[in-house]
Image (spheres, rainbow, N blue to C red):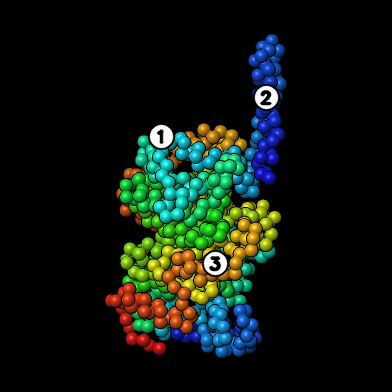
């Protein structure tokens, strides 16, 4: 089995090959950014602090000390409804795999963070908009169960448009499946921290995301139940710009804190050290 | 316009004429209308078969949304006893949710229901059955009470979805739904959920996780409304009929997928054509489910509930290999 650090590097190389262009424009302040610099800065605009959406692999590399042991890496979705619209569901999946470099919308596994062993799952918005079908539900459920089994805390970084249409009610039922698995972690009195990133809506926000003990949001991330378009159509008026942002969540009491991406790892470690004084520590490798 | 209501029109006219003829023949016993009545009744029966014999998914969507379809209140009214309990103890009482304690055929139960209105006035009060966070939190409060007093939970699901408005977002719609789902996966009493009309998305699922899921024959349960699905996938709500067919949202489809447990047959023409018998059939099925669960230990019920949800869309053997391989 290849070392998992190699796996991470391999995945990163795959991604880099696919990134078009050397320069990126910040959608917030309009600054033109050199892609390499942007990546070194954890995909945060050096001028205005705008947090770009982050591929799962980059997020894992930014949080985990050295090695990451991915679980259920090869799980591929089936096509239970034999879905076809403009394309078949398998064709859509293949295209997203090509585009994102991941084979499903979540990457889950185990590693250490500041020497504390953790289970970590990171959703990838670049794969089917981070939507949750059976594989995403399965991997999240496995993460909770396996974390409970190993006696380690679980951390999930969400980025999702909700449940995946092409898998119908099976996708919706993943809300129940992930919740059921979470009860195992709760019964073991182990912490579950959720990091809400842009965007987190629908079936993911209305299930395991908002069931966390501690809810962290990235600055300005859009987080909510109903999509903005749906609400605007329902009430027939334009919503204020800051509606459903991380800041809106804090104001209304639905998240614990907003954390800048550069401080995220340190903040998670601090929280875990306080909550879990006896957390298993290992020497930091990297 | 509701396609079932449209298709029913001819049928209702025929039935009206049969009724008229019957009362006419009662008033004038000397004149015999027997053959005319029989002919009309045969025509009526064949029209019923034609209209309701093989409903498409789209027609079932409209049957589930039929304005005369029995609401949760029809089923609750048929319980032996029911005391409604109000409010979430934090913000307000959401009339889109009816909750309370009662008896079903002598069995003590906690009842949770999503309730649409029958007319405009009631629909305004009930918000068309679209639940706000405080409605889910009332449900959550009652789920906890059910556990405390060992009351099995029965739920009635009938909503196009959770309320998608500003207030709902401000008060944490996601969290409210998430907490209900989580609570139902672990609550230490049997849970029997029944989809009686529209089971719309996460807002329906908040009361729709249970040891047994029953659906009325023409009820639907879907990841999103067909209109919503068409708007999301194709940016075109007019493709709703196509979406309805693809989503596999009928009771038959969902039983085939192993997501629901029982289908309760409806009278020809749908539940609204004979509310009393529909109510009786569903209550009987709920009672059977409660009795079957009642003989098991709660540990066994919880184990089976866990396995039931854990296995929807699962790859168990492959997983065990992959998880082990990583350690």
In the depicted structure, whether residue A80 falls above or below residue B324: above
Question: Which residue in the structure is indicated by mark 2?
Answer: B18
Relative placement, left or right, of B40 versus B145 is right
**Where, quadrant-wise, is the N terminus of chain A in this rendering?**
bottom left
Mark toward the start of the polypeptide (2 vs 1) = 2
| CA–CA distance in space, label 2 to label 1 | 36 Å
In the rendered structure, are the residues bearing label 2 and label 3 in contact, judged by CB atoms less than 8 Å apart? no
Q: Are marks 2 and 3 on the same chain?
A: no
**x, y percent for residue A115:** 35, 82
In the depicted structure, whether residue B153 falls above or below residue A4: above
Q: Residue at x 60, y 43 (%)?
A: B120
Query: What crowding class fits label 2: few (fewer than 14 Cα within 10 Å), some (14-19), or many (20 or more)?
Result: many
Q: Subunit of mark 2?
A: B
Q: Residue at x 71, y 34 (%)?
A: B10
Relative placement, left or right, of B61 versus B309 is right
Q: Are marks 3 and 1 on the same chain?
A: no
Front: mark 3 or 1: 3
Q: Subunit of mark 1?
A: B
SS of the residue under disc 2: helix
| CA–CA distance in space, label 2 to label 3 | 58 Å
Question: Which residue in the structure is indicated by mark 1?
Answer: B80
Question: Which residue in the structure is indicated by mark 3?
Answer: A244
In the rendered structure, are the residues bearing label 3 and label 1 in contact, judged by CB atoms less than 8 Å apart? no
Q: Subunit of mark 3?
A: A
> Which picture quadrant has residue B178?
bottom left
In the depicted structure, whether residue B269 falls above or below residue A168: above
Residue A149 in view, yes or no: no
**x, y percent for residue B63:** 61, 43
Q: Residue at x 36, y 76 (%)?
A: A271
């Amino acid at each position: 089995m290849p070392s998992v650090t190699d796996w991470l590097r391999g995945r990163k190389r795959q991604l880099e090959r696919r990134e078009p262009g050397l320069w990126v424009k910040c959608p917030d302040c309009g600054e033109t950014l050199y892609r390499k610099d942007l990546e070194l800065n954890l995909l945060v605009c050096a001028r205005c602090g705008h947090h770009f959406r982050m591929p799962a692999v980059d997020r894992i590399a930014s949080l985990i000390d050295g090695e990451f042991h991915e679980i259920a890496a090869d799980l591929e979705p089936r096509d239970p409804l034999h879905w076809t619209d403009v394309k078949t569901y398998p064709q859509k999946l293949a295209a997203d795999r090509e585009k994102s470099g991941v084979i499903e919308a979540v990457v889950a596994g185990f590693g250490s963070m500041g020497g504390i062993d953790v289970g970590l799952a990171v959703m990838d918005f670049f794969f089917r908009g981070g939507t949750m079908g059976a594989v995403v539900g399965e991997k999240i459920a496995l993460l909770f169960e396996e974390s409970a089994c190993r006696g380690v805390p679980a951390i999930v970084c969400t980025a999702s448009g909700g449940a995946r249409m092409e898998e119908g009610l099976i996708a919706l039922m993943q809300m129940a499946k992930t919740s059921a698995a979470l009860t195992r972690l709760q019964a073991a009195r182990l912490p579950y921290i959720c990091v809400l990133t842009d965007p987190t809506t629908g079936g993911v926000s209305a299930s395991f995301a908002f069931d966390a003990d501690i809810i962290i949001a990235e600055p300005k991330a859009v987080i909510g139940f109903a999509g903005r378009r749906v609400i605007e159509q329902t009430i027939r008026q334009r919503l204020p710009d800051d509606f459903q942002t991380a800041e809106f969540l804090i104001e209304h009491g639905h998240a614990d804190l907003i954390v800048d991406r550069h401080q995220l790892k340190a903040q998670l470690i601090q929280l875990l050290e306080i909550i879990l004084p006896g957390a298993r520590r290992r020497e930091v490798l990297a | 316009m509701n396609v079932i209501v449209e298709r029913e029109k001819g049928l209702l006219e025929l039935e009206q004429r049969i009724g008229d003829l019957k009362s006419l023949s009662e008033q004038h016993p000397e004149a015999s209308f027997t053959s005319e009545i029989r002919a009309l009744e045969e025509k009526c029966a064949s029209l019923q078969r034609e209209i309701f014999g093989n409903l498409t998914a789209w027609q079932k969507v409209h049957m589930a949304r039929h304005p005369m379809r029995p609401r949760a209140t029809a089923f609750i009214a048929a319980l032996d006893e029911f005391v409604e309990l109000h409010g979430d103890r934090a913000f307000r009482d959401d009339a889109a949710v009816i909750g309370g304690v009662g008896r079903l055929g002598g069995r003590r139960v906690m009842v949770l229901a999503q309730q649409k209105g029958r007319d405009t006035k009631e629909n305004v009060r009930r918000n068309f059955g679209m639940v706000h966070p405080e409605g889910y939190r009332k449900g959550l409060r009652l789920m906890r009470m059910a556990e405390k007093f060992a009351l099995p939970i029965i739920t009635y699901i009938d909503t196009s979805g959770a309320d998608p408005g500003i207030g709902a977002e401000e008060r944490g719609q996601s969290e409210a739904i998430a907490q209900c789902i989580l609570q139902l996966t672990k609550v230490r009493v049997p849970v029997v959920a029944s989809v009686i009309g529209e089971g719309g998305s996460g807002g329906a699922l908040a009361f729709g996780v249970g040891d047994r899921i029953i659906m009325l024959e023409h009820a639907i349960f879907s990841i999103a409304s067909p209109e919503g699905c068409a708007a999301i996938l194709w940016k075109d709500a007019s493709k709703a009929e196509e979406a309805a067919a693809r989503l596999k949202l009928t009771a038959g489809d969902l039983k085939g997928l192993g997501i629901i447990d029982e289908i309760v047959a409806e009278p020809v023409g749908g539940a609204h054509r004979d509310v009393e018998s529909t109510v009786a059939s569903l209550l009987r099925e709920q009672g059977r489910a409660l009795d079957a669960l009642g003989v098991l230990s709660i540990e066994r019920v919880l184990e089976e509930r866990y396995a039931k949800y854990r296995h929807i869309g699962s790859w168990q053997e492959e997983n065990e290999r992959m998880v082990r391989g990583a350690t």
